[in-house]
Amino acid sequence: MESSSRTLVCSVLFLDIAEYSKKPVAEQLELKQAFNQLLAMAVEQVAPRDRIILDTGDGAAVTFMGDPEDALFAAMTLRNGAGTLPVRLGINLGPVRLVKDLNDQMNIIGDGINVAQRVMSFAAPGQLLVSRSYYEVVSCLSRDYLSLFRHEGSRTDKHVREHEVYSVIGGRPAARHFADTESRLRAKNGTWLGFRKSALVAAPLAFVALAGTGIVARAVMDKPPPAVVEKKVEEPPAPAIMKKEFLEKRIARLEKKASEKSPKTQAAAVGAQPARVDLRIVPWGEIVVDGRPHGFSPPLQALELKPGPHVVEVRNTSHPSRIVKLDVQAGQAVTIRHIFQ
């Protein structure tokens, strides 16, 4: 295979027909024909250049390189229109790589598609499950989407790898895309539902959602990225989007921003009783202090801890956790740096 040497972050929908291999050949043919027709109907609203469909024999894997919602709405259309067709569905957001197979056709490989298959394997016929990484992105895009998900807990695959999964319940939300709800949710004072745009833009995994799916994937397909929000997002060079050099530059920018605080603000921080722990996590991580979750970094950039010993754990669904043991003093400043790669 010839690799494109570009790693992208995409939404991957993996689905199959339950107990397909146990059916007689004639019945398999009928089931696959009905499945193919249903799949074609579900993805017809997504431009062909924004998706890659792989036939897996008893099902299919669809990689969406545009809006994260494309995978959700296609999967819900499949689930709701399957009828008696016993389809299992799973969605994941993760890294994939474009390659060309022996027939010179575009293909997809990578952990993003592997995890989507494992999430699907936990589903019952007619059930749609999503990974935590996908849930974190889509749930931040619109309040309409929050009611669609129910946490199902942790599942362990055959490789003893744990996956946090959420089931998709209920019907389709009123709006098709986050952009469709912008005018409805925007208030006259410049906030959405009481939150400023900057807070929504800085939601957990926004880097993955915007830079990964919006900028990188469409740059590969020679299509300019859509303006998801009004705030201008700095566009990194596409070939280096997941490379160590780019991640290190992000940490340098975060440190420079922290160093530009006014002397008055810095003096107040030193004189405060709690210790300050600055966070430089790339691309993202869930922060857990002494067993209690404190949010995601970014957007979280600092913690205030009481003097004494603490255990800080930085979690990422696709990588081993980073555990740091601290014994901080009053007014002490500590920095935790980590790159998940």
Image: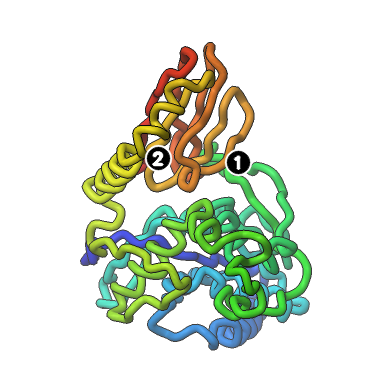
Residue wearing tag 2: 281
Q: Is residue 281 above or below residue 172?
A: above
Please tell me which residue is depicted at 25% across the width and 77% down the height of the picture. Answer: 104
Please tell me which residue is depicted at 35% across the width and 69% down the height of the picture. Answer: 215
Picture quadrant where residue 38 is located: bottom right
Q: Quadrant of the C terminus?
A: top left
Residue 241 rendering spot, x and y as whole percentages: 29, 57
Q: Nearer the viewer, residue 59 or 237?
A: 237
| Callout in the foreground (1, 2) | 2
Question: The residue under label 2 is which amino acid type?
Answer: Ile
Residue wearing tag 1: 156
Whether residues under marks 1 and 2 lie with C-beta atoms below 8 angstroms apart, the answer is: no
Q: Secondary structure at mark 1?
A: strand
Please tell me which residue is depicted at 37% across the width and 60% down the height of the picture. Answer: 96
Q: Secondary structure at mark 2?
A: strand
Q: Nearer the viewer, residue 265 or 248?
A: 265
Q: Is residue 121 above or below residue 87?
A: above
Q: Earlier in the sequence, mark 1 or mark 2?
A: 1
